[in-house]
Image: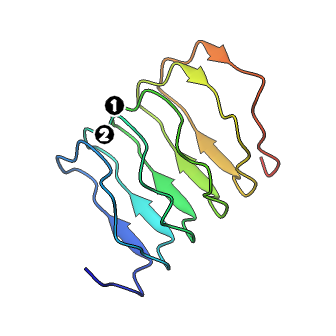
Amino acid sequence: MSLPNLTFLDLSQNKLSEISKMPVFQQLRVLILSKNFIDTIENLQELPALDVLDLTDNRILKMENLKGLNNLRILNLSNNLITALDLPYTLKSLQELNLRKNFISEIRDNISLPAL
C-alpha cells in the first residue's frame, strides 16, 4: 500500500486485535484506533510525524512501545485496562494525556513529560 500523503487514518469501531506492522506513512499525523480489541501498543515506530494517537476503548494493559514518537502531542488511552502510570522514557512533545476510566493504582516516579 502506498499512500505517501496520508495524514489522517481512522480505524475506530472495527475488530482489530493488534496494531499490525503498518506501511511507512511518513506524513501520518492522526491515528484513531478507538473501540477495537487492541491489548498492546506496538508497531508505531514507523510513524515519525504522528501527532495524535487515540486508543480509547480498547483492552490495553500497559503504556509501552511509545519510544521514538517524538512529535506525539495528544495521547488518549481512556477506558482501557491500564493499572500503572509508568513511562520510562521521555515523550518530549506530549501536551495532553488522557487516562480516564482505567484501573490505575500506581504512579511510578520514572515519568518525564516536559511539555505537560
Q: Which percent across, then down, holds residue 66? A: 56, 48
- In the displayed structure, would residue 21 be above or below residue 13? below
Upstream in the sequence, badge 1 or badge 2?
2
How many other residues sit within 10 Å of disc 1, few (<14), some (14-19) or many (≥20)?
many
Residue in view at x 71 percent, y 21 percent: 108
Foreground residue among 98 and 81: 81
| Residue displayed at 49% across by 55% down | 53
Residue nearer the viewer, 48 or 79: 48
Residue closest to the far right: 114
Q: Do labels 1 and 2 touch, CB within 8 Å?
A: yes
Q: For this view, does 6 lie left or right of residue 97? A: left
Residue at far left of view:
15
Instruction: Decide: is 58 above or below 11.
Output: above
The residue labelled by disc 1 is 59
Give the residue at x 65% y 64%. Answer: 71
Left or right of 103 on screen, residue 106: right
From mark 1 to mark 2, how far is it between C-alphas? 6 Å
Q: Which mark is residue 114?
A: none
Q: Name the image quarter holding residue 3.
A: bottom left
Inspect the image, locate mark 2, and give the three-letter code of the amino acid beneath it: Ile
Q: Quadrant for residue 109, please give it.
A: top right
- Quadrant position of the N terminus in the picture: bottom left
The residue at the point 34 percent across, 71 percent down is 23
Secondary element at image label 1? loop
Q: Secondary structure at mark 2?
A: loop
Residue 46 placement (x, y as % from top left) = 48, 65
Instruction: Kindly identify which residue carries mark 2.
Output: 38
Coloring basis for residues: rainbow
